[in-house]
Amino acid sequence: MDEDNRFANHEFPFVPKLTEVLKWKWGPQPQKEEKKNDTFRLKVENDTSFLRTTHDCIIWLGHATFFIRLNGVSLLIDPVFYDVPLVKRYAQHALSPAVFTTLDYLILSHDHQDHCQEKSIKAISKSSPSVKVLTGLNMERLIRPWLKGNEVQCAGWYQQYITSPDVRIYFLPSRHWSKRSVTDTNKRLWGAFVFQANGKTIYFSGDTGYGSHFTDVRVLFPSIDIALIGVGAYKPEWFMAANHISPTDAVTAFNDLGAKVLIPMHYGTFDLSDEPVGEPLRILKKLEAENKIHGELKALDAGAIYPV
């Protein structure tokens, strides 16, 4: 916590400034025409066959939303099934919240509208009435009115949640911030997650800028099988780098983690920044061709079932 009793990144403390937001919004946009003419769109599948199996799998549903099943335990991360106010949506959500009727855990990385959506959380609480919510410190007061009596666990960084013995879940640092209203900046803790079960380890970066927390995670979890890392909403970098990692830095972070498979996220769904919608994936493909990725790049279509 800082001197104002707000949560702070341990390496790069950050509080957003209105002057910087205005500088971004009213400043030059060198890729404006390129962005306007970019025809890239995510492919979206509506495959519900995973509901009829018990196999371990990962399904990217768009943006930072994932369904993960490990060792029979079902998780849903940062569900945003509906539009976000004042933000253009490029790709619709792959599935309806109504299909998720037996979720064990709902994972919320932080309080921003594109990760913690009231309407989506209400829908999940209704469709999976026994789901338990795992999130960061001070989040409960925000989300409690949206739930139907669901259990909520709030953790600090480097803490393990109390879960079924079939899965282990940890809350870890990310380089970001939090805010829902005028007076609550950094009053709720943001973070990343690690999920372990059935001999597999999956890392979810949450929203994050680049920092030493990736090498720190490798010390604690030296054998990460799959890393889900954001690669979009990063331009202009002078403004966004404190909170959203670029594709190039995401690859550096992936290499820092020593993970085996990189699954990119946080791109192609919402218009949140200045880069063209397809640029993150094009950069990743270029880095892959240059052998800069020390592992496998697996760029998923939204809704595609990826066996774990």
Image: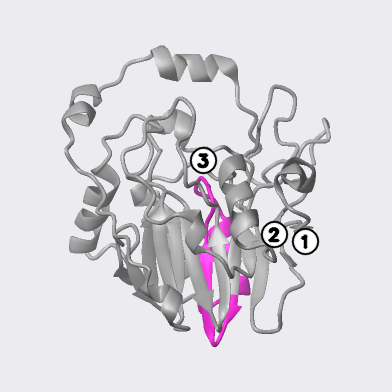
* Amino acid identity at mark 1: Glu
Q: Residues within 10 Å of mark 1 (few under 14, many from 20)?
A: some
Location of residue 118 with respect to 20 vertically, above or below: below
The residue depicted at 66 percent of the width and 33 percent of the height is 179
Quick check: marks 3 and 1 in contact, CB under 8 Å? no
The Cα–Cα distance between marks 3 and 2, rounded to whole angstroms, is 17 Å
Q: Earlier in the sequence, mark 3 or mark 2?
A: 3
Judging by the rendered image, the residue that carries numbered circle 1 is: 151
The residue depicted at 66 percent of the width and 31 percent of the height is 180
Q: Answer with the quarter of the image where residue 238 lies.
A: top left
The Cα–Cα distance between marks 3 and 1, rounded to whole angstroms, is 23 Å
* Secondary structure state at the residue bearing disc 2: strand
Determine which of the numbered discs, if any, sits on residue 65 in the image.
none
* Amino acid identity at mark 2: Val
Q: How many marks?
A: 3
Residue 43 shows up from this direction? yes
| Position of residue 155 in the picture relative to residue 72 (left or right) | right
Location of residue 225 with respect to 292 vertically, above or below: below
* Secondary structure state at the residue bearing disc 1: loop
Judging by the rendered image, the residue that carries numbered circle 2 is: 133
Q: What is the span of residues highlighted in magenta in the rendered image?
A: 196-223
Quick check: marks 2 and 1 in contact, CB under 8 Å? yes
Judging by the rendered image, the residue that carries numbered circle 3 is: 114
* Secondary structure state at the residue bearing disc 3: loop
Q: Quadrant of the N terminus?
A: top right
Residue nearest the observer in this picture, 17 or 152: 152
Identify the residue at the far bottom of this view: 199
The Cα–Cα distance between marks 2 and 1, rounded to whole angstroms, is 6 Å
| Position of residue 55 in the picture relative to residue 218 (left or right) | left
Q: Is residue 236 magenta?
A: no
Q: Earlier in the sequence, mark 3 or mark 1?
A: 3
